[in-house]
């Protein structure tokens, strides 16, 4: 996800999508998960997942207030708070306002519903060193109706946040998870929130994926395509396969860099798309077992040096030769 839509500490990034598109499945970072209008069974299932992954040591799950995150931010700690979801909060506030006979506005929401969300989300910030250097990162979740991003609550929250991660139903049903619509997803912080290593390997990936999706829609109506278009389609299919990720299967930063390197540098262009996932798992296992030092260097330096670049190229080339044999 982060290679397409970077999220920096203190940023507010909206997660938006239709019902059941993977909005809730988004190393050590203190996390506060706020369940708004969620079923107890869903919250219990999530807590079990976190417990099984040994993540409850640094995770707080609440169902009412979001004030637990503020002390962490003020004490120089980096905290993440997830509002899942603000749509249900807005509906509850609308019902309460109508019962109190307050004047309704657009979609029957009261006029101060914007303030309701902004006073929550504006607390997210990255403090400078004189204030402790802590941060509070907010990930509000909005549920859309039939992909309508122009509804009142989604447009309100989009205007408050620093960008949005748009999850699309069509991509979800195609098995492309996380189902991020590259064209509609954006981070206003951009590459400033990425490490240098991620910039080096993923700098053009989002543009290539956006161009691929645009061209793919027209390519199905034409059989006569020039070489450049065919190359764009071929690369796009493989990058799409490469960015697929299993549910509750986070990847370390250095793992992402190693895998994306193979895709964006063209080493996978001749590999069958159906074999991309198998290659990814086998390649990571190989790197973990044989080249831990390289991963450590990327993690420590935060960049791909000339030596690391040459080593990665050698590793990918040699592994592909044996993988395709």
Image (spheres, rainbow, N blue to C red):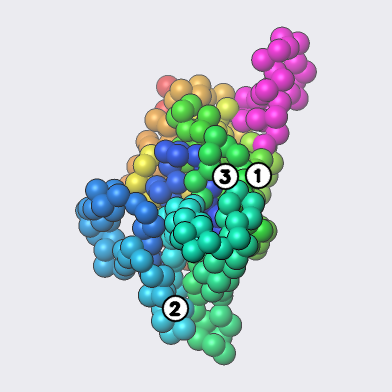
Q: Name the element at disc 1.
A: loop
Q: Position of residue 53 (x, y in %)?
A: 26, 54
Q: On the rendered structure, is 60 left or right of 221?
A: left
Q: Position of residue 283 (x, y in %)?
A: 41, 38
Residue at the image position 45 percent from the left and 39 percent from the top: 19
Q: On the rendered structure, is 146 left or right of 250?
A: right
Q: Earlier in the sequence, mark 1 or mark 2?
A: 2
Question: Mark 3, residues whose alpha carbon is within 10 Å: few (<14), some, or many (≥20)?
Answer: many
Q: Which residue is mark 2?
A: 70
Q: CA distance from mark 3 to mark 2?
A: 27 Å
* Residue 209 drawn above or below residue 162: above
* Residue 177 drawn above or below residue 51: above
Q: Which residue is mark 1?
A: 150
Q: CA distance from mark 3 to mark 1?
A: 13 Å
Q: Is residue 231 magenta?
A: yes
Extent of the magenta region: 210-236
Residue 163, quarter of the rendered image: bottom right
Please tell me whether the stretch drawn in magenta is mainly helix, strand or loop: helix
Q: Which residue is mark 3?
A: 166
């Amino acid at each position: 996800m982060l290679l397409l839509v970077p999220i920096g500490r203190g940023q507010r990034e909206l997660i938006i999508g239709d019902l059941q598109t993977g909005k809730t499945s988004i190393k050590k970072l203190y996390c506060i998960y706020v369940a708004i209008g969620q079923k107890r069974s869903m919250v219990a299932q999530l807590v079990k997942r976190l417990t099984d992954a040994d993540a409850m040591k640094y995770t707080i799950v609440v169902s009412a207030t979001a004030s637990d995150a503020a002390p962490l931010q003020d004490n120089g700690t980096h905290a993440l708070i997830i509002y899942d979801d603000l749509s249900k909060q807005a509906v509850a506030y609308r019902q309460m306002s109508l019962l109190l006979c307050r004047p309704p506005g657009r979609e029957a929401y009261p006029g101060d519903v914007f303030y309701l969300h902004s006073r929550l989300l504006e607390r997210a910030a990255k403090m400078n060193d004189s204030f402790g250097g802590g941060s509070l990162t907010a990930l509000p979740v909005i549920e859309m109706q039939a992909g309508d991003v122009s509804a009142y609550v989604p447009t309100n929250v989009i205007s408050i946040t620093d960008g949005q991660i748009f999850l699309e139903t069509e991509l979800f049903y195609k098995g492309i998870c996380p189902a991020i619509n590259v064209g509609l997803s954006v981070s206003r912080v951009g590459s400033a929130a990425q490490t240098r290593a991620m910039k080096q390997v993923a700098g053009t990936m989002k543009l290539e994926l956006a161009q691929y999706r645009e061209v793919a829609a027209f390519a199905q109506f034409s059989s006569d395509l020039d070489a450049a278009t065919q190359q764009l389609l071929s690369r796009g299919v493989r990058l799409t396969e490469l960015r697929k990720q299993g549910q509750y299967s986070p990847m370390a930063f250095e793992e992402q860099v190693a895998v994306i390197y193979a895709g964006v540098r063209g080493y996978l262009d001749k590999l069958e798309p159906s074999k991309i996932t198998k290659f990814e798992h086998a390649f990571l296992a190989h790197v973990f077992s044989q080249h831990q030092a390289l991963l450590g260097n990327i993690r420590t330096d935060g960049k791909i040096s000339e030596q690391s670049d040459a080593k990665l190229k050698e590793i990918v080339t040699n592994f592909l030769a044996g993988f395709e044999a």
